[in-house]
Image: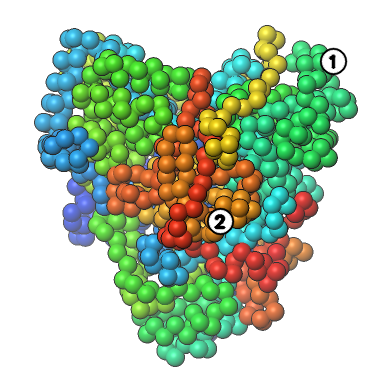
Amino acid sequence: MKRRTFLQLSGMTAASALLAGCQSKNEKLIPYLIPPDEGVTPGKATYYASSCTACPAGCGIVVRVSEGRAKKIEGNPGHPVNRGRLCARGQAIVQELYHPDRVAQPLKRVGPRGSGGFQKITWAEALGLLTANLKELQRNGPDRLAMMTPQLSGSLSALVDRFMRSYGSPHHLSYELLAPDWLRRATRTSFGQPGLPYYDLAETRYLLSFGADFVESHLSPVQYGNAFGRMRQERDTVRGHFTYVGGRMSLTAASADRWMPVRPGSEGALALGMVRLILAEARYDKAALAAHNLKAELLLDHLKGFDLAKVADLAGLSKESVAEVAREFATTRPSLAMAGEGLAFQTNGRESVRAVHLLNLVTGNLNRSGGVYPAGASDGPEHSFAELPALVEKMRTGGIKLALIKGDLRHSIPPATGFQEALDKVPFIVSFSTLLDDTALHADLILPDHAALESWGDVIPRGGLRQTVYGLIQPVVTPLHDTRQFGDVLLAAASELGGAVSEVLPWKSCRELVRETAGRRLATARGGDFETLWVELLRRGGGFDTGTGPGTTYRWVAAAKLPTPDLPAFAGDEVQFPLHLQLFSSTAFHDGRGAPLPWLQQLPDPMSTVVWDSWIEINPKTAASLGISQGDLVEVTSPRSTLRLPAVLYPGIRPDLVAIPLGQGHKGAGRYAKDRGVNPLELLVLPEGSEQAWNATRVRVTRISGKGDLVTAGHPQGSYRSDLIGI
Amino acid sequence: MEKLTSPYKWGMVIDLDRCTGCGACVVACQAENNVGICDKKEISEGRGMHWLRIERYWVGEYPDVRVRFLPVMCQHCQDAPCEPVCPVYASYHNPDGLNGQVYNRCVGTRYCGNNCPYAVRVFNFYQHEWPKPLDSQLSPDITVRSRGVMEKCTFCIQRIRRAKEEAKEEGRQVRDGEVQPACAQTCPSEAMVFGNLADPRSRVSILSRSPRRFQLLEHLGTHPSVFYLKGGGREHV
């Protein structure tokens, strides 16, 4: 189709008009005298629908483009996940595109690794280097290639899989610090399928969150933030009640009606204690138990160790409050319980998550409106954290000769895994980072990726909805620098390699691949001319009505053991390291990918109002006993390492718990993130046999000086003068 | 001469029971309005530039502690304390009930900021930088303010203008929900509702009559155009 007809078709000024290709070189000079053939009318904005890549939730976005430049990102009102809404991180990805420190062309390392010395090279040279390495390895041991990426979805995931399989290497690590592998595995054990849950939050009357911080990071923050608003105030006579269970009052917990500051690691026992009480008082849903082939007597027998007194003691809560919440939860239906990172990142995490499954089951909240459903097409890696140590061992012993890394893994993998040292043993490292981040600084070759707003792609939103949602990513501006899309580089390499690799990867570009994938997924369902459908998909930002897939209910697996969370194990001696350490994902940085963007650095953390820094949250009583005041520089020592950072006196945290936000402490990643704050992952010790136990380390905190250089944006009077304004 | 009356009186309702304090509005505002990027030093001096901030209040002590969030932007007072003190009429009231700020009149006396009880006016103490190509993001609809100029929330007046022009072309009034500022558009929990208070049937009007409504520092008699709805039912402190 010609561009002219194309544009007539989609309509220049339509709210979500689109421009195919975006390949014109219009960024140098705006040709005022030429009619708006190239999609540029001075003063007239164009809007493109795409998908957000700031986290795996995959919200739909609409980007306002004016004079060929991306100006503002809004939520896509037609997208069922975020319904026109967007979070702070999504708003900020335009700064990822225009970041002043982006890698503008391929770089080759000069000087020792990590010194930051790089030499600019052309793409021809760079691709030559990459393919020469790949070809050599293909001859003498293709299994010595390792690929490391975030957890991908859609066509890019298929592309990488095919590439690795046809090349002959099993070493593809899909790593994300906060990936919900824990949830998928627990769900598989309980229900025989890994489907992530879709919570019907908007319709529930009683929400009980066990450490699930759905406002800042859990699964799909915008979707659940929106649903939360509707749960509270969208129904005429019902206002949904919200109870939060967790040792730290997170941003999510701040919106709760009741906060239960539970002892770390005892959440699973607490959930089972509630199940037992509900069963013993016959407040359970008999039909639900029968439907899942469970018997109340057998359950009660299994749970006899979880009587109220013992559970309350374990959790450090009063018996009355536990009983009250359990009764409210059982009698206010529909209700739903969420299990989140707060309890999952303990050594007993998986069983605790399953305890919450059981709680939803006995109250009849599975597979019902206002309860929990499996989300459509939400399968993904379940064992990436088990694969990590295996790969580390392989690298350490010289079994990996070439590593292709997308993402900043050096920053987001806890050093306790030995990953960083092992990676240093790999002779050739290729990074696809857009900034000189920690990983790129230690790479031998940097092949800079496009920013998301310059790329083609597709995304299956994680967590999503009951139906499968298919979101498209399309370029909204001409690429700014001499960069190439990660997928395109792989395709180019595949075609150079020839043989089996190029056979299974015949596409010339990601655009072609995405177009074909979209066609396969959606065209058959609708029929008709694909070209028209494709334009329509791009205009809308994806296909949103693909119906519910099979397996859309949760059914308790008959053979599944009933959940039995052990007592949590913690690294570090209780006397020497008296405080539990909790790492949390802040609303701005997620797992660290928001840190390079100045808007997010400047955004005051909603709870502590800290800007441009890391901090440690301490209960005021604990702080007083340690002689620490607000803003003091303190030293945090774990059995593994020591960090210095400023202290924040935080009334919403257990006295035996301290918390540090994730995401800062980059050694690179551009001027706004470099050497700012600390990376708390350095403190972690991972107890034997644990996988994602990010919260199972003990620490001690000592005061160093009064100069913590802490800056908070909070109004000095903000903390105590709420009486003035009557809330 | 056109009469200085208007069928519009823009206002906003913020439902604190929905607000989760996530900060999306803060970034959206900064992105829409070319608000400068302030470094740590600037903010430590109390010279941060956000037009919209989220106040956080701790209430009570552990374990019976809770948090209240309060998004605060210019309240667009009908009896605005900032207006009469400006010696150069940079701070003025427009016919739509908005509290406007004419940047190129401002000479930087900061009287207005001093007189504002809500502390929502921010002054450019420094020249702000957008290192290339970060400046490509700057919106062409709004000026980039230079050092020495007072600035503040405008309810995204550029969007209101656009909507009014479009409506005028079609010979109608701006429809309810047709225009909303960046903060209200992005708010994940739909806590912010913007609209015409002069129309008694608009959503914002209906909500502003809610029994949960209150206004900031009502007793000062500034008659703000922003209404808040109290969070309800948080009985356990």
Judging depth in this view, the residue of A356 and A10 nearest the camera is: A356
Instruction: Return the x and y of residue A227 as percentages of the image width and height.
Output: 63, 43
Which of the labelled discs sits on residue A627, or is there none?
Answer: 2
Instruction: Return the x and y of residue A258 as percentages of the image width and height.
Output: 73, 46
Judging depth in this view, the residue of A606 and B174 nearest the camera is: A606
Q: Which residue lies furthest to the right in this view?
A: A281
Q: How many marks?
A: 2
Q: Which residue lies furthest to the front in this view?
A: A575
Residue A418 vs A222, above or below: the answer is: above
For disc 2, the neighbor class at 10 Å (few under 14, some 14 to 19, many from 20) is few
Contact, mark 1 vs mark 2 (Cβ under 8 Å):
no
Q: In this view, does B83 lie to the left or right of A644?
A: right
Judging depth in this view, the residue of A184 and A47 nearest the camera is: A184
How far apart marks 1 and 2 lie (CA) works out to 53 Å
- Tell me the quarter of the image containing the N terminus of chain A: top left
Respond whether the residues carrying marks 1 and 2 are from the same subunit. Answer: yes
- Tell me the quarter of the image containing the C terminus of chain A: bottom right
Instruction: Return the x and y of residue A369 as percentages of the image width and height.
Output: 71, 32
| Residue found at x 57% / y 81% | B80
Q: Can residue A626 be seen in this view?
A: yes
Three-letter code, disc 1 = Glu
Chain to which mark 2 belongs: A
Q: Is residue A670 left or right of residue A681?
A: left
Three-letter code, disc 2 = Gly
Dot 1 or dot 2, earlier in sequence: 1
Residue A521 vs A710, above or below: the answer is: above
Chain to which mark 1 belongs: A
Give the residue pinned by disc 1.
A297
| Residue found at x 25% / y 46% | A102
SS under mark 2: loop
